[in-house]
Image (cartoon, rainbow, N blue to C red):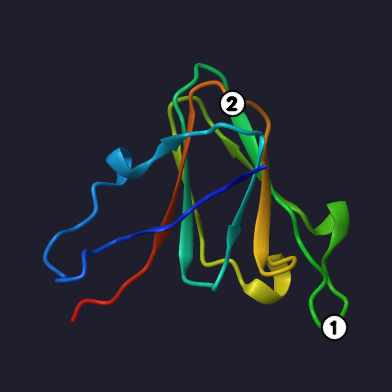
C-alpha cells in the first residue's frame, strides 16, 4: 500500500498557485491511503483509453452508519478524465486516521492529494 502525501494549493508566501497536473504522480500501487484532516482533495487522472474506478472505503460513523462494502464510494473515471474527490468527512471515511482507496487498474493513472489553504 502506498501512502499519499498532500501538497498545498499555495506556497508559504501565498503568492504561487499550484500547477495541479504537474503535482500528480503516477499510481504505484492499487491500494493507497492518506492521513485525512477533512481539508484535502483527492485528484485522480485517468490517462488510459478505458474507464477505471477508484473505491474509497467507508468507516462506521459514531452512530453506526456506513462502514463495510455497503458504504464504500466507487467513482468511475472515464478515459482521459480528471476526477476530484473532495473534503471527506473523517467520521465517515477515516480508519485509524487514514482514508483507504483502491484503484481498479494502474495503467496511466495519476494521483494527487491537495491540502486547501486560505489566502492571507
Query: Can you name the residue that lies furthest to the left here?
Result: 15
Coordinates of residue 50 in the picture (x, y in percent)? 56, 19
In the picture, measured across the screen, residue 41 lies left or right of residue 100, that is left
Rendered-image quadrant of the N terminus: top right
Q: Is residue 13 above or below residue 18?
A: below
Query: Can you name the residue that lies furthest to the top here?
Result: 49
Q: Nearer the viewer, residue 86 or 31?
A: 31
Q: Is residue 118 above or below residue 2?
A: below
Labels 1 & 2 near each other (Cβ < 8 A): no
Q: Nearer the viewer, residue 33 or 38?
A: 33
Label 2 neighbourhood size at 10 Å, few (<14), some (14-19), many (20+)? Answer: some
Q: Nearer the viewer, residue 51 or 1?
A: 1
Mark number, residue 101: none
Mark number, residue 63: 1
- Give the alpha-carbon distance from disc 1 to disc 2, as whole Å: 35 Å
In the picture, measured across the screen, residue 116 lies left or right of residue 48, that is left
Mark number, residue 106: 2
Q: Is residue 78 above or below residue 48?
A: below
Coordinates of residue 23 in the picture (x, y in percent)? 33, 44
In the picture, measured across the screen, residue 24 lies left or right of residue 73, that is left
Coordinates of residue 98 in the picture (x, y in percent)? 65, 63
Q: Is residue 111 above or below residue 4?
A: above
Amino acid at each position: 500500500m502506498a501512502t499519499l502525501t498532500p501538497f498545498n494549493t499555495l506556497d508559504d508566501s501565498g503568492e504561487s498557485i499550484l500547477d495541479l497536473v504537474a503535482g500528480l504522480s503516477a499510481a504505484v500501487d492499487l491500494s493507497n491511503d492518506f492521513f485525512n484532516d477533512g481539508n484535502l482533495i483527492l485528484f485522480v487522472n485517468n490517462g488510459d483509453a478505458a474507464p477505471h474506478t477508484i473505491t474509497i472505503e467507508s468507516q462506521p460513523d459514531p452512530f453506526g452508519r456506513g462502514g463495510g462494502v455497503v458504504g464504500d464510494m466507487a467513482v468511475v473515471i472515464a478515459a482521459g478524465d480528471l476526477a476530484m474527490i473532495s473534503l471527506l468527512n473523517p467520521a465517515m471515511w477515516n480508519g485509524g486516521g487514514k482514508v483507504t482507496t483502491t484503484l481498479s487498474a494502474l495503467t496511466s493513472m495519476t494521483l494527487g492529494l491537495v491540502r486547501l489553504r486560505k489566502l492571507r
